[in-house]
Image: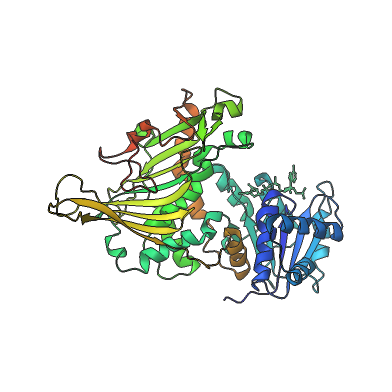
């Protein structure tokens, strides 16, 4: 367990959805697990005037909603005593001076300060400016850290503009850029399973691997977030960070150690080694589609364009890309990455197909697959060829299937892990600016090209498998989308 300095977490946007569902309950759980330092305060900052009592009642409501089976009253009392509220009305020019006054009460608020900006992305830079204007980012005596929620920009220029703005006041070591996927234990496990196992690392390269698929699919549609989604799309929403981060962990070289610098250095290198997607041959490298009306779990659901109420939208709810990594380990190995809403299954996984075996026995023989399940099931599966007992020499695939999660294992939410890392000063599970920029640099040309192309977008019925047309991006005829359950499952 790392030592945590006494500190104050200043939570901007504490009344918002993220705070209610993840941050407050996450902090409470950390307190219950004994992971918060004794001297640790939480100062919630919001636009409205709210008394401390009313704020405590609000927090109780958040915890009641999250922990339906109840919680320990002693922990609750300790937790609630840490919580304070500060009103920061946007109309008050002195608001941040008053925030500084509030925080100057050293007995209540330890002076190491972590600011969590759970606010609208357009407010990230102005809040940092205002904190700097009242000298609340100065690290002369105490540490000062700022968490920037997702998204960090909406393209490369806006990410660079945000970076330029906040680095007028902050060093890279003070900036904690969130991709909450990195807080998931299953993602951290990719690195460990790869490098802590002699049987995996030697075959993890172009000599043995035919191709890699990284998949994140949902059965859910866009719900009531239609306007947000139509301004975002699947590439920005999922691929730009979550899926590319999963790819980075799958493909990176072994870090020199497990320090934040060690891990980030190798992730940056591999992200920067991804070959730019050729926009002049986009149709062979990228495929998009939108869900049409269909059935999910036996229930009829409308299509994306109907939900949006705009038949002209070309925004994708399905996106698949083919990527190549130009380094010695991966030269020539396609990485197919895809994300979709309203597919037939909700699953996040990495599926690796190995090359043809040296002995070819005849029909029915499959290539080996290794599958790392991230969500919902955390597992590792290996498919190998085995003789069917009997007089003839015939093979079938059998599965070695191990759950990474076992009964009684701790369930830690990604935000709990990230909040703890923040207080510990460990930013290895947060994004470095070079990662953010490499990710935008890769997807921006595709987003631009797709936005310009106003032809109607390919439709797939809600609840179906990948559109047949998506196979256009495969390099070889015998490649197919791999699903989670069945052995050697094909898209047909
Ligand atoms: N919700 C999620 O699961 C999730 C997931 C990923 C990323 N994020 C990111 O996390 C951040 C917070 O998300 P959220 O869903 O919690 O946001 P939210 O509920 O819409 O808003 C957060 C807070 O911002 C303040 N706010 C809202 N509208 C405002 C306005 N017009 N002017 C000034 N302040 C305003 C409100 O606080 P006061 O009224 O108290 O000032 C509100 O509680 C965003 O950057 C989002 O992109 C959220």
- Quadrant of the rendered image containing residue 100: bottom right
Q: Is residue 353 above or below residue 236?
A: below
Query: 476 or 273, which lies in front?
Result: 476
x, y percentage for residue 392? 12, 51
Q: Is residue 40 left or right of residue 308?
A: right
Is 89 in front, or is 52? 52
Residue 128 appears in the picture as rendered: no
If the image is split into quadrants, where does the C terminus sit?
Answer: top left
The number of callouts visible is: 0
Residue sticking out furthest to the front:
390
Observer-nearest of 295 and 144: 295
The image position of residue 18, as x and y in percent, is 67, 51
Q: Position of residue 340 (x, y in %)?
A: 48, 39
Q: Is residue 215 or residue 140 the one in the foreground?
A: 215
> Residue at point 37% right, 56% down?
251
Q: Which quarter of the picture shows residue 229?
A: top right
Quadrant of the rendering where the N terminus is positioned: bottom right
In this picture the colour scheme is rainbow
Left or right side of 251 for 115? right
Horizontal placement of 165 versus 285: left or right?
A: right
Is residue 121 visible from the viewing direction of this image? yes
Residue 378 coordinates in the image, percent (x, y): 45, 58
Residue 129 higher or lower than 423, as above or below: above
| Left or right: 259 as drawn, with respect to 415 | left
């Amino acid at each position: 367990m790392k030592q945590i300095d006494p500190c104050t977490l200043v939570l901007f946007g504490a009344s918002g959805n993220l705070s209610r569902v993840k941050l407050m309950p996450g902090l409470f759980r950390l307190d219950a697990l004994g992971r918060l330092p004794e001297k640790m305060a939480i100062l919630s900052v919001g636009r409205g005037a709210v008394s401390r009592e009313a704020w405590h009642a609000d927090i109780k409501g958040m915890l009641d909603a999250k922990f339906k089976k109840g919680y320990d009253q002693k922990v609750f009392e300790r937790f609630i005593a840490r919580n304070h509220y500060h009103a920061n009305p946007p109309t008050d020019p002195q608001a941040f001076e008053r925030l500084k006054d509030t925080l100057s009460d050293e007995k209540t608020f330890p002076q190491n300060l972590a600011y969590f900006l759970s606010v609208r992305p357009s407010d990230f830079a102005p809040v940092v400016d205002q904190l700097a204007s009242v000298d609340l980012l100065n690290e002369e005596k105490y540490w000062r850290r700022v968490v920037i929620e997702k998204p960090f920009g909406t393209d490369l220029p806006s990410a660079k503009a945000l970076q330029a703005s906040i680095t007028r006041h902050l060093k890279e070591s003070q900036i904690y850029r969130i991709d909450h996927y990195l807080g998931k234990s299953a993602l951290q496990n990719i690195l460990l399973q790869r490098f802590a196992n002699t049987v995996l690392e030697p075959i993890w390269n172009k000599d043995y691997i035919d191709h890699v698929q990284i998949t994140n699919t949902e059965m859910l549609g866009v719900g009531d977030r239609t306007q947000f989604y139509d301004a975002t799309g699947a590439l920005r929403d999922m691929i730009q960070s979550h899926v590319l981060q999963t790819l980075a962990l799958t493909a990176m070289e072994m870090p020199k150690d497990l320090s934040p610098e060690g891990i980030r250095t190798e992730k940056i290198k591999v992200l920067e080694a991804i070959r730019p997607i050729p926009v002049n041959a986009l149709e062979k490298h990228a495929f998009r589609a939108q869900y049409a009306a269909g059935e999910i779990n036996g229930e009829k659901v409308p299509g994306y364009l109907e939900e949006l109420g705009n038949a002209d939208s070309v925004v994708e709810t399905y996106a698949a890309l083919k990527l190549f990594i130009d380094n010695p380990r991966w030269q020539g190995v396609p990485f197919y990455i895809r994300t979709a809403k309203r597919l037939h299954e909700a699953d996040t996984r990495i599926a690796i197909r190995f090359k043809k075996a040296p002995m070819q026995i005849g029909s029915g023989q499959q290539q080996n697959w290794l599958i790392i399940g991230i969500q919902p099931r955390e597992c590792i599966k290996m498919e190998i060829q085995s003789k069917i007992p009997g007089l003839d020499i015939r093979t079938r695939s059998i599965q070695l299937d191990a759950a990474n999660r076992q009964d009684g294992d701790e369930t830690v939410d990604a935000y709990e892990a990230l909040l703890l890392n923040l207080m510990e000063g460990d930013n290895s599970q947060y994004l470095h600016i070079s990662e953010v920029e490499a990710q935008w640099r890769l997807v921006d040309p595709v987003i631009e090209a797709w936005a310009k192309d106003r032809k109607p977008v390919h439709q797939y019925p809600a609840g179906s498998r990948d559109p047949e047309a998506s196979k256009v991006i495969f390099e070889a005829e015998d490649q197919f989308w791999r699903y989670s359950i069945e052995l050697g499952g094909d898209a047909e």
